[in-house]
Amino acid sequence: MTHTLEIKAISPVAHNVFSYDLERPDGFTFEPGQATEVSIDKDGWRDEKRPFTFTSLPDDDRLQFTIKSYPERGGVTDQLSHLLVGDRLIIDEPWGTISYRGKGVFIAGGAGLTPFLAILRAQNESGHLAGHTLLFANRRERDIILQDELDLMPGLITRHILSQEDKSGYDFGRIDRAYLEKVIEDFDQTFYICGPDQMVEDLKGILDDFGAKPEGLVFEE
């Protein structure tokens, strides 16, 4: 079943990332970490569906998506960045295999943070965020999505890794074998991974080599 929903608010959360708050249909439910297919309710775009993750909480009054714009591609995300409050999006039913399975390490690359936002927000709201770690990789400081919110989450250990800027207060480089060996003491825990496909595949292999259990790796299948 599809729903055509009005955009109630649009907020910039990084230099090329926006949060879109939508009206919420009666009875619509989802789990933190789930996504849905989204398209724009305009001629020529209704059939151009793309998967985006809910970044609101299941009991929020509105649905929210946090979406990075890629203007160089001239596609859906570029069109989304030109929308205004009052425009409408079309969404399908929720789906996805990323779900919360207990305390662990969240590893995100760029927009790969979005499936983890609702999960971390839900843990924060319930007062159970302590003991979680977020490793968040970006190219530059300005690319970091919702940095202030993440850095202020009580109990969450957040490490920002920049690959194209060497700045005080940030780790420099990439989340690779050497980096994980340096910052992770216990590989017998849950690891949540989301980012570019190659990054996810590389990390799955590295974590397996370090002894992480296959059932302890959470990623979009």
Image: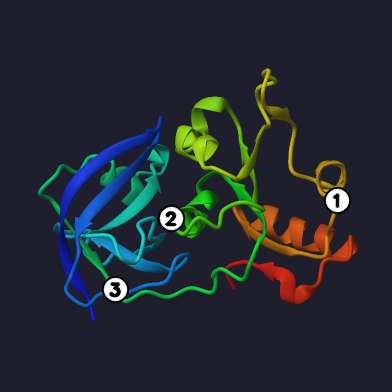
> Horizontal and vertical percent for residue 38?
30, 63
Label 3 secondary element? loop
Q: Amino acid at mark 1?
A: Glu
Viewer-nearest of discs 3 and 2: 2
Label 2 secondary element? helix
Eyeballing the image, is 33 above or below 140? below
Residue at point 37%, 49% (across, down): 66
User: Which residue is the extreme one toward the bottom?
Assistant: 1
> Horizontal and vertical percent for residue 72?
41, 38
Q: Residues within 10 Å of mark 2 (few under 14, many from 20)?
A: few
Viewer-nearest of discs 3 and 1: 1
Label 1 secondary element? loop
**Disc on the earlier residue, 3 or 2:** 3
For marks 3 and 1, give the CA distance.
Answer: 41 Å
Labelled disc at residue 125 = 2
Labelled disc at residue 92 = 3
For marks 3 and 2, give the CA distance.
Answer: 27 Å
Q: Are marks 3 and 1 in contact (CB under 8 Å)?
A: no
> Horizontal and vertical percent for residue 32?
44, 66
> Horizontal and vertical percent for residue 55?
39, 55
- 48 and 164: which one is in front? 164
Q: Are marks 3 and 2 in contact (CB under 8 Å)?
A: no
**Disc on the earlier residue, 3 or 1:** 3
Residue at point 24%, 42% (across, down): 10
Q: Amino acid at mark 2?
A: Glu
- Residue linked to disc 1: 185
Eyeballing the image, is 187 above or below 157? below
